[in-house]
Image (cartoon, coloured by chain):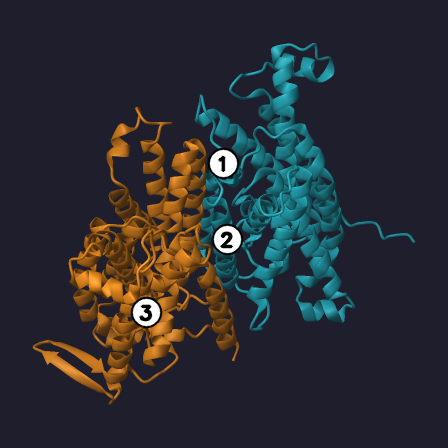
Chain colours: A cyan, B orange
Amino acid sequence: MARPAPSGAVRAVHRRRLLVLGGLCAALAVATVLSITVGAKPVPLGDVWHALTGPTGTENDIVVRSLRLPRTAIGVLAGVALGVAGALMQGHTRNPLADPGLLGVTHGAAFAMVFSVMVLGVGSLYGYIWFGLAGALVASVGVFALGMAGGGGGPTPVTLALAGTAVSSLLYALTSALVLMNEQAMDVFRFWQAGSIAARGGDVAWQVLPFIAVGLVLALVNAPGLNTLSLGEDVARALGQNITLTRTVGVTAITLLSGASVAACGALAFLGLIVPHLTRPLSGPDHRWLLPYSGLAGAVALLLADVIGRVVARPGELEVGVVLALVGAPFFVALVRRRKPVRL
Amino acid sequence: MSPVGGAGTVPETGARETGATARPDGLPLRAGPVSWLLRLRSAVVAAVLLAGTVLLMALTMRLGDIPMSVAQVFGAVVGDGPDHFVVMELRLPRALTGALVGAALALSGAITQAVARNPLASPDILGVTTGASVTVVAVIVAAGSTWGGASGALAQVGVPVAALGGGLAGALAVYLLSWRRGLDGYRLVLVGIGVSAVCTNVKYWLLTIGDVNDSSRAMVWISGSLNGRGWEHVVPVGLALALLIPLTLLGTRSLGALRFSDETVTGLGVRMNLARGLMLLAAVLLAATATASAGPITFVALAAPQIALRLAGTAQPPLLVSALVGAALTTAADLVARTAFNPVELPVGVVTAVLGAPYLIYLLIRVRRKARS
């Protein structure tokens, strides 16, 4: 079936969108290089190349291959996942303040993981990723259901934020009750809670990769349906869309993406909130473009925040979760102050 | 100013349109320019609550290394037997701290809810508790072995002082950041959530750099605990309550007016921003003092005023009854914390959070139902 030739204006839009996509890819490349070279021990670019192509066991080779590469890989994966999850969440809730960290997903995953380690004796990371995902799912569904409860259409930003706070504090209380009974668990938990991509081995990246890959595919499949849904549920229904299916696919994608990244890196607040706000002006409301943009921008933001954390607190490091909170909170406050955060 | 519950939400406190001052079932007390309405139902409820709190305190004072009967506890308070020291120096201060802290938190919550015109508001999300937590964790971690020498000065600051300072600073930050040509309840809550998120993340980071023993100690404190509280914890909260209860009761009338629209309030002759500011300041001082004594015990400030409202049948949270409900709730929660997982004793804040969160959820659903109908 021959499509009509696109008019000049449409072509210009296409060109601009591809240009932005190219720009974001370039930014990601730069951020990746920074993440591999900058650190407690600066590694010259030549040595990075050497380590990647023909390692001979020099000190720089070991630093790059066993520390910097896994760290960067996890940063990219978690950044992409959280950026896309944030955009999806904001789209499905039509709520500009939606963010996995604010909506209880993080604490859901945390509780499930601590519970699995302490009560069920799960030892391997592969084991507790599943628990993290389950916890994230239960918490996210719970918060949305709460926001919707009582009827009257979708939840407003404030009810959703408060529902998230309520669920989070409940789960946090349960988690700390468990952790307080066991000092060893406390020692593990506090590092996980701060949110970091440092000192994770390469195997962590491989283990979360399948979950994030499936989540990304589901997210892209979900994009056209989400576009229709954003015209309103009635319109979408009139156009013959299966709303339940679209919502289910969306929530599954959100859970896989945020659950996997939370299980791997701990609590990374604000990333999923900020990134879609930065990319939406570039993409417009079309989720087929917003989602890839947000994914790339999320990875760039996470890597840059991590590099900042390594540079500012020398000789120590600031966890990337702390950097994100310090940068993200002013952004959030500005967002709240600028206008009433209307529904998207 | 719009109600916090979102577009079109009717605030719980404004549900009944008959003002408290118009009710015939009260006994007006006058002293010069000051008048106060004594309502019979509130007085009965208050008396019952007071008796209940005393009984609950006696019950929790039975528990410890030397178990006692309730009669023995009462006997030890008056007499000077061998139990006198244990009860007067160890158990009574702890029980009193719990009751007073609960009262202060609940009073603070009642004021906050009236000013924000929303049953979901509480000092928990106004930056007081999170500001206090992050400062206290900083002090505990600094006092520990990791940073010992370099930060000795910081470690010298006592935990209660740090909590008070941090709580006030947190509240000030939230207030300044949400002020924009007036104070909007909606913006206040959202800014509060944002500021809390930062404090929480900084707190987590501080927990990671400390020694694990210090971090555990800090973790107990930031959960809200009554363990090991002595008279030095009772006195500050007691003083704050003694000073601020009369002052807030004087402000009851402007609080009553605050639930109408801004235009009406100005028409009634209440200087709105001043009244609002002063009452909020009192709320912040109460919450900060309470937090300094027992750590951030969550949800008492949120739930107690709403329970009091239903018990007393008033149009908005009654201040004194709220305080008494808070005292009873906290004492009961501590009783549960000490007995539920015997022999392990939980921090009381864990119990209030576990009990309070479902309540907040119920409240959210109700507010939305109301908004719809």
Whether residues under marks 3 and 2 lie with C-beta atoms below 8 angstroms apart, the answer is no
Image mark count: 3
Query: Where in the figure is residue A101, as x and y percent of width and height?
Result: 54, 49
Q: Quadrant of the N terminus of chain A?
A: bottom right
Rounded to the nearest angstrom, the CA distance separating label 3 from label 2 is 24 Å
- Amino acid under disc 3: Val
In depth, the one of B46 and B12 nearer the eye is B46
The residue under label 3 is B325
Furthest-right residue in view?
Answer: A1
Furthest-front residue in view?
Answer: B82
In depth, the one of A243 and B21 nearer the eye is B21
Residue at the image point whose x is 41% and y is 31% from the top:
B211
The residue under label 2 is A174
Mark 3 Cα shell of 10 Å, populated few (<14), some (14-19), many (≥20): many
In depth, the one of A14 and A67 nearer the eye is A67
Vertical arrangement, residue A18 with respect to residue A88, above or below: above
Mark 2 Cα shell of 10 Å, populated few (<14), some (14-19), many (≥20): many
Whether residues under marks 1 and 2 lie with C-beta atoms below 8 angstroms apart, the answer is no
Rounded to the nearest angstrom, the CA distance separating label 3 from label 1 is 37 Å
Is A165 placed left or right of B48 in the picture? Answer: right
- Amino acid under disc 1: Asp
Is B82 placed left or right of B198 in the picture? Answer: left
- Judge if badges 1 and 2 mark residues of a common chain: yes
Mark 1 Cα shell of 10 Å, populated few (<14), some (14-19), many (≥20): some
- Amino acid under disc 2: Leu
Whether residues under marks 3 and 1 lie with C-beta atoms below 8 angstroms apart, the answer is no
The residue under label 1 is A187
Q: Quadrant of the C terminus of chain A?
A: bottom right
Rounded to the nearest angstrom, the CA distance separating label 1 from label 2 is 17 Å
Looking at marks 1 and 2 on the same chain, the residue that comes earlier in the sequence is marked by 2
Residue at the image point whose x is 67% and y is 11% from the top:
A57
Query: Where in the figure is residue B20, as x and y percent of width and height?
Result: 27, 82
